[in-house]
Image (cartoon, grey):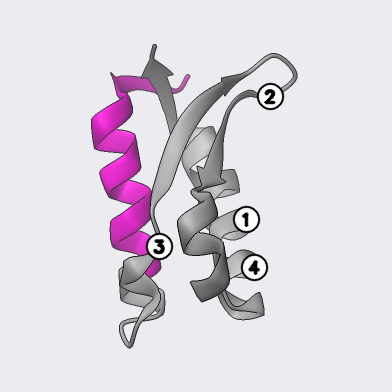
Amino acid sequence: MAKKISVDELTWLVTNALQKAHPSGQSRIAVAIVPDKSHGWRVVVANSSRAYVSAAAKQQLVKVEKQLKREYRPAF
């Protein structure tokens, strides 16, 4: 069963995982956790940050999201 945590904590976990994977500049990416009817929740990237998202960072975001969905459930 997934552990219930706040959206802020979940956002921090995503940001922290992305910074660990890409310490050289992907930290400028602004992400948010939003509710999703199909999947419960998902990670979205702010329009202003999309120019900084590399293909590797996109893959990392997908990987991190899948991993965290197994472990956590945000309290919206």
- Label 1, on which residue? 62
Query: At 59% across and 78% down in the image, what residue appears?
Result: 54
Q: How crowded is mark 2: few (under 14 residues within 10 Å), some or many (20 or more)?
A: few
Query: At 70% across and 14% down in the image, what residue appears?
Result: 37
**Which quarter of the figure is the C terminus placed in?**
top left
Q: Residues within 10 Å of mark 1 (few under 14, many from 20)?
A: few
Q: Distance between the residues labelled 2 and 1?
A: 13 Å
- Residue type pointed to by label 1: Val
Query: At 33% across and 56% down in the image, what residue appears?
Result: 15
- Label 4, on which residue? 59
Of the two numbered discs 4 and 2 on the same chain, state the one appearing first in sequence.
Answer: 2
Percent of width and height locating residue 30: 38, 53
Q: Distance between the residues labelled 4 and 1?
A: 5 Å
Q: Distance between the residues labelled 3 and 4?
A: 14 Å
Left or right of 69, for residue 55: right
Q: Who is closer to the viewer here, 47 or 61?
A: 47
Of the two numbered discs 1 and 3 on the same chain, state the one appearing first in sequence.
Answer: 3
Depth check, mark 1 against mark 3: the one in front is 3
Q: Who is closer to the viewer here, 39 or 49?
A: 49
